[in-house]
Amino acid sequence: MHLKELTLSNYRNYQNLSLKFDNRRILFVGKNAQGKTNILESIFLTCSGRSHRTPRDSELIRWGQDTCYIKVLVEKRMGYNSIEVFLSHKDKKRIKVNGVMIQKLGELMGHFNAVIFSPEDLKLVKEAPSERRRYMDIEISQIRPQYFYYLQQYNRILNHRNNLLKEITKSSQAKKMLEVFDEQLSEAGAFVIKQRFEFVDSLSKIARDIHERISLGAERLNIEYKPSIKVSSLDTANIKKEFLAALERNREEDIQRGSTGIGCHRDDIGFEINGVDVRVFGSQGQQRTVALSLKLSDIELMYRETGEYPVLLLDDVMSELDDWRQRKLFEELGDVQVFITATDLNSIPPWELEKFHVYEVEEGKVTRRQIY
């Protein structure tokens, strides 16, 4: 999978931008606040339908403009895919795939896959569980679009249930509705939990090998999915049964709290190196190596699931990695197309720089730069 063309109109600080890529190594270089990250953000937007930086689409529209437009052309094994995103202050977001307007965001998933790695991701191991859940949701949705539908359904039902819990103390009729929402929540949640178990299990096996190579065999990484509900088997019907029973056990506590205390929205991922919890006892270097192993594993897992490597987006992350981790990163990439942002050419190891097409970014203007 390779990104061949990118077109932006009134996106962030870009009035008009049109780029064509005929290389697998692309570097955007320039000072801070010039628009480098905006380019990577726009690329990821066409994969997921959402920015990785803000939940508000209105922030993506150039100041003083009413609409913006993003288009990519992606080369895949079986041909080309074009994806267009239309944003407006007045209307809902519209997305076209190969010229056809999609009706649901889930229909976008899988047409163009990308893995994004930013300095914030280096904190993935030690940050709050919500960040790790978000990570799981993004990656699984790209390789298994049906997951996205069930996740949306789960979140919608959860919101209704939480609103109902707040009303129960005021209305006796509201309590009767709780059983209906419990049934629906456990059904959607069972699918989400099963998919997360399978994803993390596959990811852990790949990450263990990658991490062992990066650490020269000194560290054995184990990644474990930790649902808030005890699950005895991965049979979806059984997960639903156990989920429903857990909701019933916690019902009075939920009513007192006014929110749902267990479920997919409370799950987490655990990381251990040589049997020790990395989040609690790992050094910063170990935590960063785990994050790097995780992102590299995403690439390999997507390839095994879809038959194609995703595009890798590295947003100002090279300066955060030491020479050793930089070297191991490039050794693992192979033929993966990678887009990197950096403040200077020194962010790229000299032995790799000659492979890159370099673009200079300054105040929303992008110019191809010859370095040799």
Image: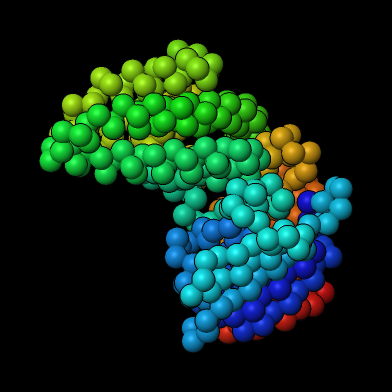
Q: Nearer the viewer, residue 255 or 124?
A: 255
Q: Is residue 211 above or below residue 63?
A: above
Q: How many labels does the image show?
A: 0
**In this picture, residue 279 sits left or right of residue 304:** left
**In this picture, residue 266 sits left or right of residue 107:** left
Q: Which residue lies furthest to the right in this view?
A: 78
Q: In this view, does 232 lie above or below 346?
A: above
Q: Residue furthest top?
A: 232
Q: Residue at x 47, y 72 (%)?
A: 58
Residue 299, how many percent across, how many down? 68, 43
**In this picture, residue 273 sits left or right of residue 292:** left
User: Quick check: can you spot residue 292?
Assistant: no
Residue 175 position by quadrant: top left
Q: Residue at x 39, y 17 (%)?
A: 242
Residue 233, how many percent across, how many down? 50, 13
Residue 162, how many percent across, how many down? 28, 41
Q: Residue furthest front?
A: 173
Q: Which residue is drawn at 28% across and 31% down?
A: 178
Q: Which of 156 and 301 is in front in this view?
A: 156
Residue 86 position by quadrant: bottom right
Q: Residue furthest bottom?
A: 64
Q: Is residue 327 above or below residue 211?
A: below
Q: Nearer the viewer, residue 139 or 275?
A: 139
Q: In this view, does 359 lie above or below 155?
A: below
User: Quick check: can you spot residue 304?
Assistant: yes
Quadrant where the C terminus is found in the figure = bottom right
Q: Which residue is drawn at 19% across and 42% down?
A: 167
Residue 306, how many percent across, how many down? 74, 39
Residue 10 position by quadrant: bottom right
